[in-house]
């Protein structure tokens, strides 16, 4: 097993300890993770809930799935309001025995504050993952992060948008974020047969080099741990993200396409550690990040 | 549901553009139920990226059969598999039809390719069966010889027989203890009317329908397949794809 003791939020009253560097992205396992043969929970560092909204949830959004070349454009249905999701699903979240990170999608700092206050009543919450709505500006990000830090004792991870990853990562860190998730899937739009446009999130392993570039940029600009989120589809993709500056990895839609990805990457990372004669996760990160070339010079 | 590798046992094209692929997969043969589906990886790489949901068409001792039109590059890839090829699946997925050994008559009603998820019922229920299908052209009629002998088969072609079709569906709703159907959502509104006419109302437990949802994950995670029912929003992939017609808002 990988000797990982990655701590997020060391200065918080309650820190988030990841025993594995491999995580499901928020929503990738839904509200109720499937058991058994699909995923091995002992290889995962935490469970992240789907993004949850305020009292009325995010604005209504008709779900759509469109295939693209080597990818898909997905506009999922709106997330559940936080209170309803906690009432309905928290027992399922706890069932896996992993640290629970609750993903929040507030529209304003006031809503973020209220949601963090609700979560503060639940001791099982071990982290908050803040998702920034598309149009949120820097002052909005600052307000949301400060609101969550003000109301909650647990670490606050901020998932930055694909298009403005570095700028908003720096804002989030200055506001008190304990970690940065790089990045939300890029938005795209497709014209469908009936002349309607469908807007959604683009998912594809073909985007891995673009995610790696974002991780590299953000790693140069912040000091808090970075979690790379993306469609890593191989051990090589995972190593690329780690070399670019990530400390942990979130797997998204690839979990639906290739459920064995977690076990495959975990085994490959164990092999990488053995090959480099390192026993601790931190040592592998140092080896990868110091020994690698600067991707900007490639 | 679990990851599976199935081996192609047979691959035929009984009607132009429609493929019938038999897969050797004893786990599915043992555990799958009529109405369930599998998520098929229709590529050797990641193009297309997402798995394709396909209904279980027939259930055998050693596996399942899939029936589909090669209407996309993904399904064309699957249609091109040869005997002995391996196919990567997740399954069985979803909630199947409610079946009972006490049923003595069942009516199956399909529009278009709606026959795909219905025939597996005949592999698990010994009841007398009526099968009504409605297809656009004679070339789309499902071959009689692929059906069990006990099935009374009534294929309707084109729109000129709409009145006869409506009458036959109403009769089938009267005749069968249970009605199982598959077609587009608009078709379920007319089926509901037929059932209300035949049975003087529609209550739960009389008719079940198979919903073809747009799916990204097939395992209840992405919520891309939500539909609104009388009991609130439900996921087609895990709460369905079989729903009681009385609960649908059609």
Image (tube, grey):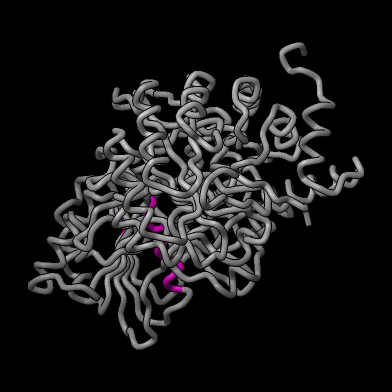
Could you tell whether B168 is left or right of B42 in the image? Answer: left
**What percent of the width, then of the height, locates residue A297?**
76, 11
Residue at 46% x, 56% y is A125
**What percent of the width, then of the height, locates residue A27?**
46, 47
Tell me the quarter of the image containing the C terminus of chain A.
Answer: top right
Q: Is residue A56 above or below residue A168?
A: below
Is B240 one of the magenta-colored residues? no
Residue closest to the eye, A59 or B13 = A59
Residue at 25% x, 38% y is A59
Q: Is residue A68 above or below residue A221?
A: below
Q: What is the magenta range?
A: B110-122
**What percent of the width, then of the height, locates residue A93?**
47, 61
Residue at 76% x, 17% y is A294
Residue closest to the eye, A145 or B91 = A145
Q: In the orientation shown, which residue stands out farthest toward the bottom?
A: B102
Tell me the quarter of the image containing the N terminus of chain A.
Answer: bottom right
Is B111 one of the magenta-colored residues? yes
Could you tell whether B112 is left or right of B15 in the image? Answer: left
**What percent of the width, then of the height, locates residue B177?**
25, 79
């Amino acid at each position: 097993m990988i000797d990982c003791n990655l701590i997020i939020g060391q200065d918080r009253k309650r820190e988030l300890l990841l025993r594995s560097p491999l995580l499901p992205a928020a929503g990738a396992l839904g509200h109720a993770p499937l058991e058994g043969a699909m995923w091995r929970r002992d290889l995962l560092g935490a469970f992240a809930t789907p993004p949850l909204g305020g009292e009325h949830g995010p604005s209504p959004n008709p779900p759509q799935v469109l295939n693209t070349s080597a990818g898909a454009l997905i506009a999922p249905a709106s997330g559940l309001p936080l209170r309803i999701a906690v009432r309905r699903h928290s027992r399922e979240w706890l069932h896996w025995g992993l640290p629970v990170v609750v993903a929040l999608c507030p529209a304003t700092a006031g809503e973020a504050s209220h949601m963090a206050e609700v979560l503060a009543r639940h001791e099982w919450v071990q982290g908050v993952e803040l998702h920034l709505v598309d149009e949120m500006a820097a002052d909005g990000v600052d307000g949301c992060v400060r609101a969550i830090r003000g109301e909650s004792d647990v670490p606050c991870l901020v998932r930055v948008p694909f298009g403005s990853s570095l700028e908003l990562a720096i804002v989030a860190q200055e506001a008190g974020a304990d970690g940065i998730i790089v990045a939300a899937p890029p938005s795209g739009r497709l014209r469908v047969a009936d002349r309607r446009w469908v807007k959604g999130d683009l998912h594809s392993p073909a985007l891995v080099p673009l995610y790696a570039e974002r991780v590299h940029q953000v790693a140069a600009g912040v000091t808090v741990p970075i979690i790379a989120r993306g469609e890593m589809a191989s051990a090589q993709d995972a190593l690329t993200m780690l070399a670019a500056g990530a400390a942990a990895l979130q797997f998204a839609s690839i979990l639906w396409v290739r459920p064995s990805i977690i076990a495959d990457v975990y085994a490959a990372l164990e092999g990488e550690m053995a090959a480099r004669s390192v026993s601790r996760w931190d040592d592998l990160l140092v080896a990868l990040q110091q020994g690698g070339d600067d991707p900007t010079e490639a | 549901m679990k990851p599976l590798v199935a081996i192609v046992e047979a691959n035929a094209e009984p009607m132009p553009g429609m493929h019938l692929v038999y897969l050797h997969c004893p786990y599915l043969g043992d555990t799958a139920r009529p109405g369930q589906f599998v998520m098929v990886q229709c590529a050797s790489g990641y193009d297309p990226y997402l798995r394709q949901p396909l209904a279980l068409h027939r259930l055998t001792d050693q596996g399942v059969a899939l029936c589909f039109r090669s209407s996309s590059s993904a399904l064309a890839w699957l249609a091109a598999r040869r005997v002995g090829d391996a196919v990567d699946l997740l399954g069985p997925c979803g909630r199947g039809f409610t079946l009972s050994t006490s049923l003595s008559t069942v009516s199956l009603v399909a529009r278009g390719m709606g026959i795909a998820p219905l025939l597996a019922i005949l592999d698990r229920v010994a009841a007398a069966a009526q099968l009504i299908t409605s297809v656009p052209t004679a070339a789309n009629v499902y071959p009689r010889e692929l059906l069990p002998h006990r099935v009374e088969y009534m294929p309707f072609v084109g729109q000129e027989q709409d009145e006869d079709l409506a009458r036959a569906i109403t009769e089938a709703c009267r005749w069968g203890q249970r009605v199982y159907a598959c077609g587009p959502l608009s078709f379920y509104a007319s089926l509901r009317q037929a059932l209300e006419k035949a049975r003087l109302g529609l209550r739960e437990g009389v008719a079940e329908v198979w919903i073809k949802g747009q799916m990204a994950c097939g395992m209840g995670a992405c919520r891309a397949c939500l539909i609104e029912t009388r009991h609130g929003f439900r996921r087609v992939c895990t709460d369905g794809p079989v729903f009681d017609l009385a609960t649908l808002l059609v």
